[in-house]
Amino acid sequence: MPKMKTRRSAAKRFKLTGTGRIRRNKANHRHMLIRRSNSVKRKMRKAGFVAKAEEKRVRKMLGI
């Protein structure tokens, strides 16, 4: 059976943590930041986690 290929776009966007959860960057931090409060912009800097409902799909894309 051939090796499973990784979707390269997914590999650039998601990272696996030591405990096995999948980390992702938060959205809406590219432009139109003037109207957002400093606290919202600060929260978007930190990485979030992929929702449990989406984890199976993301793992399949990463070939895990």
Image: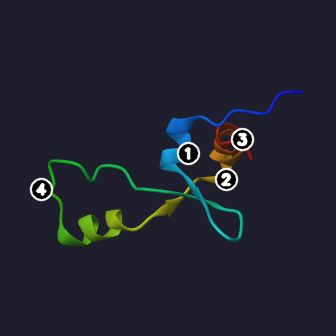
- Helix, strand or loop at label 4? It is loop
Q: Are marks 2 and 3 in contact (CB under 8 Å)?
A: no
**Is residue 13 depicted above or below 39 in this figure?**
above
53 sits left or right of 9 in the view: right
Labelled disc at residue 52: 2
Whether the residues at callouts 4 and 1 have beta carbons within 8 Å, the answer is no
Give the mark nearest the N terminus, 4 or 1: 1
Q: CA distance from mark 1 to mark 2?
A: 18 Å
Please tell me in which quadrant of the rendered image residue 2 appears.
Answer: top right
Q: Amino acid at mark 2?
A: Lys
Say which residue label 3 marks. Answer: 63
Q: Are marks 3 and 1 in contact (CB under 8 Å)?
A: no
Which badge, 2 or 3, comes first in the chain's sequence? 2
Specify which label sits upstream in the sequence, 1 or 2. 1
Q: Nearer the viewer, residue 47 or 38?
A: 47
Q: Please, what is the three-letter code of the amino acid marked with disc 4?
A: Arg
Instruction: Give the residue at x 18% y 66%.
Output: 37
Question: Which badge, 3 or 1, is on the more N-terminal residue?
Answer: 1
Q: Residue furthest left?
A: 34
Which secondary structure lies at badge 1? Answer: helix
Label 4, on which residue?
Answer: 35
Q: Earlier in the sequence, mark 3 or mark 4?
A: 4
CA separation in Å, label 2 and label 3: 17 Å
Residue closest to the far right: 1
